[in-house]
Amino acid sequence: MSIYDSIRAQIVPITPEGYPFIGAFALVSLILFWLWSPLGWLGTLATVWCTYFFRDPPRVTPVREGLVVAPADGRISQITTAAPPHELGFGPTPLPRISIFMSVFDCHVNRSPVTGRIERIVYQPGKFLNADLDKASADNERNSLVIATPGARVAVVQIAGLIARRIVCFVREQQPVGIGERFGMIRFGSRLDVYLPEGTAPLVAVGQTSLAGETVLADLRATGVGLAFRSG
């Protein structure tokens, strides 16, 4: 391996969606330097933060059948049972829900929690309340994905927050998706909810830090849902 390859291997990749923002921050920094150098240095710090925000580090995803992994980096803020948003078509029955809150310092690239097929994508306009509030699940702007995986359906909901004003989705309906595969991101600070099949036991705790594509949230084979996996 050459020195160039060694250096490149140490650099965390940047998601392509971030380049326009990084370029804009850098341009503003140059203008600020021209006006007054202390402002330019502040702009440089902001540019460094913007670059850090749009990082897209590689992840090692467990691929055993039945696992559900975290779709986002952040803090496990809630583990509860709640009725899914009406647009998912899951009905009124409360389901296990794991909520992950992403601060502006977390990586915001979202990854699929399971392997399957994108059955439905529904965008729902709404408010921009603090994403850490429980009512944000029903009131805030959001983008919902229903993923059909063998024997079960799992939903993941991207929820906008006070600062997050832009939800980005990379996938389309009927598209196959692999566990840990990138499916979208939210700018800048937000929350993701994962709705699991009835009876699924979460394997994480409130306050735990999750890594998108790596942290195991649940094992569908450990519940009644797992019978569908074993029976084919």
Image (tube, rainbow, N blue to C red):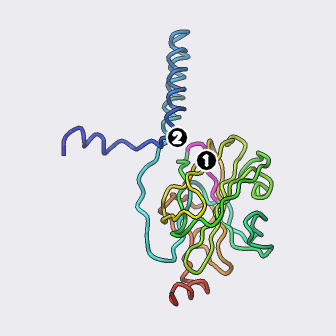
Mark toward the start of the polypeptide (1 vs 2): 2
User: Where does label 1 land, which residue?
Assistant: 168
The stretch in magenta equals 100-105
Q: Secondary structure at mark 2?
A: helix
Residue density around tag 2, few if under 14, some if 14–19, many if 20 or more, within 10 Å: few
43 falls in the magenta region = no
Q: Nearer the viewer, residue 185 or 49?
A: 185
Q: Nearer the viewer, residue 83 or 38?
A: 83
Q: Relative to residue 35, is residue 99 drawn left or right?
A: right
How far across and down, in percent of the image, does residue 139 sit? 80, 54
How far across and down, in percent of the image, does residue 104 sit? 60, 42
| Cα–Cα span, label 1 and label 2 | 9 Å
Residue found at x 52% / y 32%: 20
How far across and down, in percent of the image, does residue 76 sit? 62, 60
102 falls in the magenta region = yes
Residue found at x 78% / y 76%: 93
Residue found at x 74% / y 47%: 130
Residue density around tag 1, few if under 14, some if 14–19, many if 20 or more, within 10 Å: some
Residue found at x 63% / y 45%: 189
Q: Nearer the viewer, residue 201 or 127?
A: 127
Q: Relative to residue 100, is residue 23 drawn left or right?
A: left
Instruction: Give the amino acid type for the residue marked by disc 2 in the picture.
Output: Glu
Instruction: Give the amino acid type for the residue marked by disc 1 in the picture.
Output: Val
Residue 180, compared with residue 104, is above or below; it is below
Tally the numbered discs.
2
Q: Secondary structure at mark 1?
A: strand
- Farthest bottom residue? 231
User: Where does label 2 land, which residue?
Assistant: 17
Circles 1 and 2, Cβ within 8 Å, touching? The answer is yes
